[in-house]
Amino acid sequence: AQKITQTQPGMFVQEKEAVTLDCTYDTSDPSYGLFWYKQPSSGEMIFLIYQGSYDQQNATEGRYSLNFQKARKSANLVISASQLGDSAMYFCAMRGRSTGRRALTFGSGTRLQVQP
Amino acid sequence: GAVVSQHPSRVICKSGTSVKIECRSLDFQATTMFWYRQFPKQSLMLMATSNEGSKATYEQGVEKDKFLINHASLTLSTLTVTSAHPEDSSFYICSALHGSGQYNEKLFFGSGTQLSVL
């Protein structure tokens, strides 16, 4: 079974500062993928960044980077230079490879509020 | 990124009626789509996996006769909530797999449907 844990129900950050959203996971699958999605108040899920369990480097996508620590089973999302438009729910998710299950398992989410 | 269109975005219906929600992949073919349900301030819970040309696979606890899924083409999956009741009120969101079948294939989501059953 796979499990994603996001321990921060809500976070505040000042505009232009960096913020880290925590994500830990548990899986028995030796090969897996980790994802982060953003959900604004409008409801759509926006893909942000992906990290493969065997990737040698941490993933980066613009202002988003993923701090992947495999031994600790953590995949924290770092948003640099926060903008007001970053205010949203953020979900960490994962998919194991060997099970053949292609759906994502999501964490409970973190609500980020960027303050001017 | 790939575009997934979901319609309607909001629907209000009377108890006992059926509601159909459509999910379309606009610029790619999706042999597999997923339907999730999300309660307020909660995470997304997988309801079922929709496979083109075959029966959907439902998660444990999801009533297949209540939530009918049809994936008749490579770009369209529909979810029909039959005989809806107030407890079915929720945010339903579809997603489509885009990729080459590897484990890093990405999931793109529709904009969701807010169902309210009176």
Image (tube, rainbow, N blue to C red):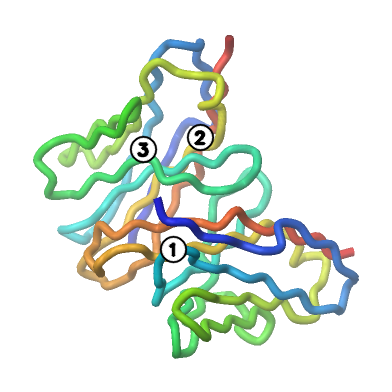
What amino acid is found at the position of numbered circle 2 in the picture? Answer: Thr
Q: Residue at x 64, y 38 (%)?
A: A41
Residue A71 horizontal side relative to residue B19, left or right: left
The subunit carrying tag 2 is A
- Front-most of A57 and A70? A57
Residue B72 horizontal side relative to residue A99, left or right: right
Q: Residue at x 32, y 46 (%)?
A: A25
Residue that protrudes farthest toward the bottom in the picture: B54
- Picture quadrant where residue A21 is located: top left
Question: Mark 2, residues whose alpha carbon is within 10 Å: few (<14), some, or many (≥20)?
Answer: many
Mark 2 sits on what residue?
A110
Residue that protrudes farthest toward the left in the picture: A56
Residue that protrudes farthest toward the front in the picture: B27
> Residue A83: where, in percent of width, then height?
49, 19
SS category of the residue bearing label 2: strand
Mark 2 or mark 1, whichever is nearer to me: 1
Of mark 3 and mark 2, the one earlier in the sequence is 3
The subunit carrying tag 1 is B
What amino acid is found at the position of numbered circle 1 in the picture? Answer: Asp
What amino acid is found at the position of numbered circle 3 in the picture? Answer: Cys
- Front-most of B110 and A106? B110
The subunit carrying tag 3 is A
Report whether mark 3 lies on the same chain as mark 2.
yes
Q: Which mark is residue B27?
A: 1
- Front-most of A1 and A102? A102
